Image (cartoon, rainbow, N blue to C red):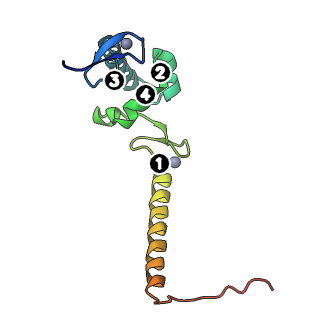
Amino acid sequence: MAGKLKNCPDCGKIYVDTGTGMCRDCYEKMEDQMAEVCSYVRDNPHSKVKEICDALDVKEKLVRRMIREGRFTMDGIDFEYPCEMCGKLIHNGRYCENCASQMAKDMEKADERAQEKLKESQGLGVGMYSKNMGI
Ligand SMILES: [Zn+2]
Ligand SMILES: [Zn+2]
């Protein structure tokens, strides 16, 4: 037996799952839609995700999936879409430069904190400073 019988999450039909996560019809439909989205974006490079969905009657989920999979970047399409953190329009990756560097900083800080904890636990008491609040 190759593959398992499943219900297609899209149309509800029973299909043999070969790892596509949906039935053959829906999979082909999705591939078609992706191709449509690609050519639409090529013609309208500054369209927003919402506009694409409205114009082509596709689900926003599909366009987001294409962004995550890097379809537009792969095809060399200059497509702007919102940063997942702040909504600023970006061309590649999932976050804008600000959010990306903010996240990198946060990560560094977390790292520093880990380092400090390590020093503390080793009893090296680094640069104790007292804050003089008030006045
Ligand atoms: Zn289906
Ligand atoms: Zn951002």
In the orientation shown, which residue stands out farthest toward the front? 1
* Local crowd size for mark 2, using a 10 Å CA cut-off: few (<14), some (14–19), many (≥20): some
Q: Is mark 1 within 8 Å of ligand 2?
A: yes
- The residue depicted at 42 percent of the width and 18 percent of the height is 9
Name the residue carrying label 4: 63
Quick one: label 2 or label 1, which is nearer the N terminus? Answer: 2
Mark drawn on residue 76: none
Q: Given contact means CB atoms under 8 Å apart, are the residues at marks 2 and 4 in contact? A: yes
- The residue depicted at 49 percent of the width and 68 percent of the height is 109
Tag 1: amino acid: Cys
Q: CA distance from mark 3 to mark 4?
A: 17 Å
* Element class at badge 4: helix
Name the residue carrying label 1: 96
Quick one: label 3 or label 1, which is nearer the N terminus? Answer: 3
Report the number of discs.
4
- The residue depicted at 72 percent of the width and 87 percent of the height is 132
Q: Nearer the viewer, residue 41 or 107?
A: 107
- Quarter containing the N terminus: top left
Q: CA distance from mark 2 to mark 4?
A: 7 Å
Mark drawn on residue 21: 3
Q: CA distance from mark 3 to mark 1?
A: 30 Å
Vertical relation: 1 (above or below) 122: above
In the orientation shown, which residue stands out farthest toward the left? 1
Name the residue carrying label 2: 59
Q: Given contact means CB atoms under 8 Å apart, are the residues at marks 2 and 3 in contact? A: no
- Quarter containing the C terminus: bottom right
Tag 3: amino acid: Gly
Vertical relation: 58 (above or below) 45: above
